[in-house]
């Protein structure tokens, strides 16, 4: 989100299309709940009194010798003088042990404060919906002095809670700041309504819930959500990276890639409240984007006026003008596998062209779907600063 590049790209695009639009088997995820483990560690058992959130260099929570396993954690409690106080409490509670161990385990993944986690993420069991992530890393020169690091913006294309046509598409955004040394990122979920396809008015996101996001490797993670909009929706989505990893790494300074650095959020300020999340992936030879918009003349339509499209094209390293096919997907249910996979049809073509790290255009021509007959060009500006390594 290379020998014989053309054949390889074609095969990859077919594979990506099937991954994006067809239902596959569930991704595996850890038995312990690290989000609950975070509360247990920092509040219930107050382990952070000695093992800080990574802020105290000499006493880092993730330096615990357990390795993020239940057996290792029990062993540390039994053999470490300062931890033996937990021998009759934490060590005797299987559920708490599993959750605390899971929390410690995700802390051994690469630092989240890097652009490399930017990209397209999904759960195979509910393929046909997914989450696009952009990480805005901090630029502090001395990590030990950071009280807060960067931020994360996520865009989520999904559906209503019942099967239907394009009017059952739904999309949300989520935003939050990363705290130094803390692997779990709290987010606020927003919903935008009242816009019109590629036209004013601008819209503002309204808070509709909260979420947590963490990554336990460069290719896997988890997104937990809780809606406060009256629907009572709560759940956890195990995430797998859609395309190949490009720059996510344990190594510092983090590697950069001028092509992948174009990945992220783009919009037209004149129609703020709709926009694109783009992944430019030279390792996969593909460009994938999700387009968050509305129905034409939809200013008064509410949530049923939301629309999203996806687009996919082949990518050759160094390219800055990339043709794509635009798709419309219907028939899914919010965070739920369906007996029949969502239906995806090609509804148009487009071209995204990058003029610089902060300016681009997207030309589109719809031949079917909700926006059939619409054609135009959108002048795009990058949301936030350019990613490291962008030239």
Image: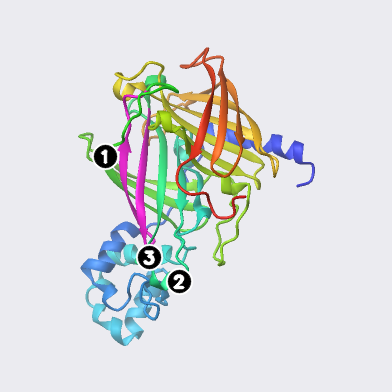
**Camera sees residue 22:** no
User: What is the distance, in whole Å, between disc 2 and disc 1 at their CAs?
Assistant: 34 Å
Q: Which residue is mark 3?
A: 180
Within 10 Å of the Cα at label 3, are there few (<14), some (14-19), or many (20+) other Cα atoms?
many
Which of marks 3 and 2 precedes in the sequence?
A: 2
Is 160 situated above or below 300? below
Q: Position of residue 358 (x, y in %)?
A: 53, 42
Element on which disc 2 rests: loop
- Residue at left offset 32%, top offset 79%: 77
Sequence-earlier tag: 3 or 1: 3
Q: Which residues are magenta?
A: 170-195
Q: Earlier in the sequence, mark 2 or mark 1?
A: 2
**Viewer-closest of 280 and 377:** 377
Q: Residue at x 79, y 41 (%)?
A: 4
Q: Which mark is residue 142?
A: 2
Task: Characterize the local packing of mark 1: few (<14), some (14-19) or many (20 or more) Cα atoms within 10 angstroms.
Answer: some
Report x, y in % for residue 57: 40, 78
């Amino acid at each position: 989100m290379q020998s014989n590049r053309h054949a390889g790209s074609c095969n990859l695009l077919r594979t990506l299309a099937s991954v994006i639009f067809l239902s596959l088997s569930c991704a595996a995820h850890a038995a312990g709940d690290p989000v609950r483990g975070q509360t247990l560690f920092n509040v219930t058992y107050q382990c952070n009194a000695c093992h800080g959130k990574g802020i105290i260099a000499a006493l880092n929570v993730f330096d615990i010798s357990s390795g993020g396993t239940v057996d290792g954690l029990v062993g540390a409690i039994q053999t470490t003088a300062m931890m033996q106080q937990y021998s009759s409490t934490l060590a005797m509670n299987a559920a708490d042990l599993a959750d605390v161990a899971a929390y410690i385990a995700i802390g051994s993944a690469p630092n989240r404060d890097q652009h490399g986690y930017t990209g397209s993420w999904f759960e195979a069991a509910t393929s046909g919906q997914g989450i696009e992530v952009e990480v805005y890393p901090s630029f502090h020169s001395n990590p030990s002095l950071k009280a807060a690091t960067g931020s994360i913006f996520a865009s989520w294309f999904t559906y209503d809670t019942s099967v239907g046509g394009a009017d059952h598409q739904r999309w949300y955004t989520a935003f939050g700041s990363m705290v130094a040394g803390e692997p779990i990122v709290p987010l606020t979920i927003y919903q935008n309504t009242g816009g019109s396809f590629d036209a004013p008015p601008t819209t503002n996101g309204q808070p509709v819930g909260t979420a947590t996001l963490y990554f336990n490797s460069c290719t896997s993670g988890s997104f937990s959500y809780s809606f406060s909009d009256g629907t009572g929706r709560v759940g956890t989505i195990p995430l797998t990276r859609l395309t190949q990893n490009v720059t996510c790494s344990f190594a510092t300074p983090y590697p950069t890639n001028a092509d992948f650095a174009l990945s992220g959020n783009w919009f037209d300020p004149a129609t703020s409240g709709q926009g694109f999340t783009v992944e430019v992936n030279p390792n996969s030879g593909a460009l994938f984007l999700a387009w968050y918009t509305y129905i034409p003349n939809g200013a008064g339509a509410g949530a049923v006026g939301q629309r999203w499209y996806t687009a996919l094209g082949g990518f050759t390293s160094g390219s800055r003008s990339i043709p794509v096919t635009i798709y419309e997907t219907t028939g899914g249910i919010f965070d739920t596998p369906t007996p029949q996979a969502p239906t995806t049809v090609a509804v148009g073509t487009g071209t995204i062209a990058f003029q610089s790290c902060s300016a681009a255009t997207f030309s589109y021509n719809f031949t079917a779907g909700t926006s059939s007959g619409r054609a135009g060009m959108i002048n795009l500006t990058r949301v936030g600063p350019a990613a490291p390594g962008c030239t």
